Amino acid sequence: MGVRTTLIEIYKKLTTYDKKIGIITNGVDNLYPERVDRFINNSVTAKTCAKIMSTYLSAKGFGKVNDKIIVNSKEKTTLQKFTTQIARSLSKQRGVFINVTYTLGYEPASYKVLPYNSCRLGKKDDDKYNGKIGVSDDWENKKLKEIDITFIDVFNNNKKIVKNQIANEKGGTELEKLGNYRGQILYFNLDDEYLYALSQVDAVLKDCDSEAQASIYKNRSLRKGFFGKTIVITKPLAGSLTDYADATEYNEALSERDNFKETIDSFIGAEDNGGVIHVELEHDSENFDQEIKFENIDSNIDDKIFEYTESSVFDNILMAFNSIPSGLIRPVNTLFGQSANAIEQMKLVYQDNTRTERNEMLELIRFLMGIFVKPVVGLELEPLVIETQEEDDTTNK
């Protein structure tokens, strides 16, 4: 019971009504979707997983009708592209916002997947119904006002409701009003027990960040650290002013030292000259090895230091994306390791792991196409991997 209470309290903190801009915030700072995108894009594992999951959700599409059905003639969006766009949003955010426009006959005329980050639910009415969805590309702007947000009606394909919404638009003729009508927005949420969907990486956001930070640390160590440097040791190229007859002679010595450093930088190369350290010994020597000597400090970043952390982070992210088999992310050369059959089995396993999300997405697309201006029925997603059954030897006897 204590855990449940904590979860409820956390959830309430994530979604609050902001009176200033008229929307329900997604996250304590209203930037949860943006933060999720950044974490995924900064993590090579999470980004790869999202791409793979998206592929398994959209599968091979709907066969021959993929490119024949146009769901948005203005943007030339085919059913295949529409399906892919939905799958991408679901694989990252577990939700998708779809803009629906209508004909004069009050039937859905086009569909468009909106950037998930751009949309926020509007205020609920007395019946706990969100009547509007706010759209903005500038949620990070602290000075954003309600007037700066475009509010669009929530999806409801009841023809009387659509007719009234169009009638309330500015314009003279019904056609002109329809031209000014922004349509409606359908919000599809795989986590329908929550007001906003929890991202696929919600439980592993810190793991995504850890992977990104490990990469940044290694890069900074190589660029700015004391690794991969070249030390040039020479005798004193210029002493103090008291070692010379006059200031002119001293300045000439300083100039020679500067010329020497420029020559070394040129010798090392423009890209690596920041890695040269010049050390002047405090004594003269007749030994040439001490006149000028080059010492290299090799990079000693030990990957084993990060091995456990990176491995655990990798595993956690894979589990977050419906337990993607690691072989689909890091395939081993089949000549030396995993067989082609093993890879095929991994694909079948992951196809089954994503079955629930894929079926829910299919149900959504079937619904949308069933109410389309030219209804389409009987749509079936073609599996990405076809399971083959081994022939029973007894049938051949």
Image (cartoon, rainbow, N blue to C red):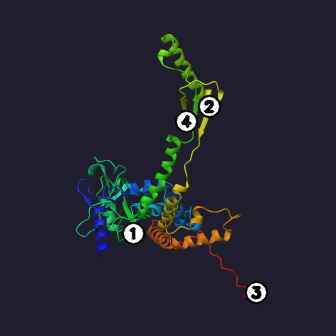
**Mark 3 neighbour class, 10 Å CA radius: few under 14, some 14 to 19, many 20 or more:** few
Tell me the CA gap for discs 4 and 2.
Answer: 16 Å
Helix, strand or loop status at disc 2: strand
Between discs 3 and 2, the one toward the N terminus: 2
Q: Which residue is mark 2?
A: 293
Between the C-alphas of marks 4 and 1, the distance is 52 Å
- Of residues 267 and 165, the one nearer the viewer is 267
Q: Position of residue 172 (x, y in %)?
A: 31, 52
Q: Position of residue 282 (x, y in %)?
A: 53, 26
Q: Which mark is nearer the camera, 4 or 2?
A: 2
Badge 2 crowding class, 10 Å Cα cut-off, few under 14, some 14 to 19, many 20 or more, is few
Q: Nearer the viewer, residue 40 or 119?
A: 40
Amino acid carrying mark 1 in the image: Asp
Q: Return the mark for residue 191.
A: 1
In front: label 2 or label 1: 2
Identified by mark 2, the residue type is Lys
Q: Are marks 4 and 3 in contact (CB under 8 Å)?
A: no
Q: Residue at x 43, y 62 (%)?
A: 204
Give the amino acid at mark 3.
Answer: Asn
Could you say which quadrant of the image residue 152 lies in?
Answer: bottom left
Sequence-first disc among 4 and 3 = 4
